[in-house]
Image: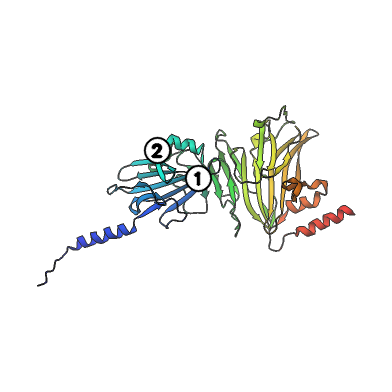
Amino acid sequence: MVVTYKIPLIIVFILVYLCTSLMQCMDVDMSMTDFPNDFNVFHGSFKDNGIYRLVQTKASQVKMVTYGNSIIESLASMGHYIIDIYVEEYKRGDMIIIGVTRACFRPRHFAKRSVYKKISNQFIPITPREKAEFIGGHISITLDWTSTKHHPLLSTALVNVYCKGLVWHCIANTPRGRRSAMLHSIFHDDEFEISPILNIDQTDNGCHPPSMLIARISRLYISPEKGSIVICIDGKLDDEYKLILPPTDDGIFQPKNIFQHVNGINGPLVRTECKNDNKLHIDISTLNTENADIVILANLKRGVWLYTQYSILPYRYSTNTFVVVENRTNNVIYQVPDNNTVVTHVDVFNHIHKDWQYVVVNTLRWNLGMYTEAKVIYKRVYDDNQNGVAYYDVSNFCTGPYHLMLSSINTKPQGDIDIHTIEDNIYRAYVE
């Protein structure tokens, strides 16, 4: 005799749901570099080459946070609440700190945040203060303004109802709205800035690194006007600075200072002593800067060149500042020679096919009662007597053709000038 049992349909559905949920549950393994599509991953950086990463997902998909075989935190059930999980990694060299945050936004608000430090193969709880000491300052969050996904602490707001432009700001610094206030309460003990801003230029860079704007930005406004951006620099009394990307007219790219509207300087500067705290170093070997006085516009693809500009905030023009341009891995390229010279920005041109680099130091020189623009052009050469690399001042040879080549770059296909032809012509003109 066979006995059969009828299982209620609702129980079958529950069992199937539970089995499916258990199968779908996974760990947030912070040793991984790739995550499933339903995980959002965002990147950033902090002081002394620190690397920041945030992994965001829902609690229903996660059973624990791990680092390889090491268990960091088990995520216990939080009932029927909708839970967001934020797992942050702070890494510098071999040192790793992991922050785990659970946040519920409805039906009621609550949050729990824990911080752990990797010691050997274990993660030991530490205090927020210890984490802050490890970070040593602000965290720069990457913003790709062409992407549809952004770090949850980044938000936008209309400037006003008549303007289509958006202001980007960091919720942790300036909360707006209920959800923003909740995130602010979670992350208020961290200091965030927005940098770099990726794909700032609308030109396709192809296989080359994306264009970007690098600065200590607390807020920025991207105008509907093409190439116009307004930024607020952290620590500069929230002053606003308008940037304009160097123009390309009729296929010709003309490098210009991104700060095109600057206040005049009345008279030569009075520099009494060259102290270290008065020196402003521009290191062209890196796209990183901890100095809030420097704004970097990087990787604009123009013709056969990748163009990068290191620009100094205009308020520093009239201060007692000595500018040093250097390739820190090798040597000093340029130093301000006297009180009559002000450095405004530095252009760097890297050829995309050949190992050619030119550096243009743009200055204002006080002469006959007024400031006039002047350029000093350097060509990178390889020299065994100069640690392998040296920068040659082309004014010792012939400046004109180099200036022409770098000040008007043809961006049209097959419109680029062959540098070998240029230099051959320079040589012929020189010897004749």
Q: Which residue is mark 1?
A: 94
Give left or right: position of 430 versus 291: right
Judged left or right of residue 331, residue 146 is left
Residue at the (49%, 48%) spot, across then down: 43
Amino acid beneath label 2: Ser
Residue drawn at x 40%, y 45% is 122
State the SS at label 1. Answer: loop
Q: Quadrant of the N terminus?
A: bottom left
Residue 124 disc label:
none
On the image, which quarter does residue 37 sit in? bottom left
Looking at the image, the residue that sits furthest to the top is: 272
- Viewer-proximal residue among 147 and 21: 21
Q: Which residue is mark 2?
A: 185
Residue drawn at x 48%, y 42% is: 170
Q: Is residue 159 visible?
A: no
For the residues labelled 2 and 1, the Cα–Cα distance comes to 30 Å
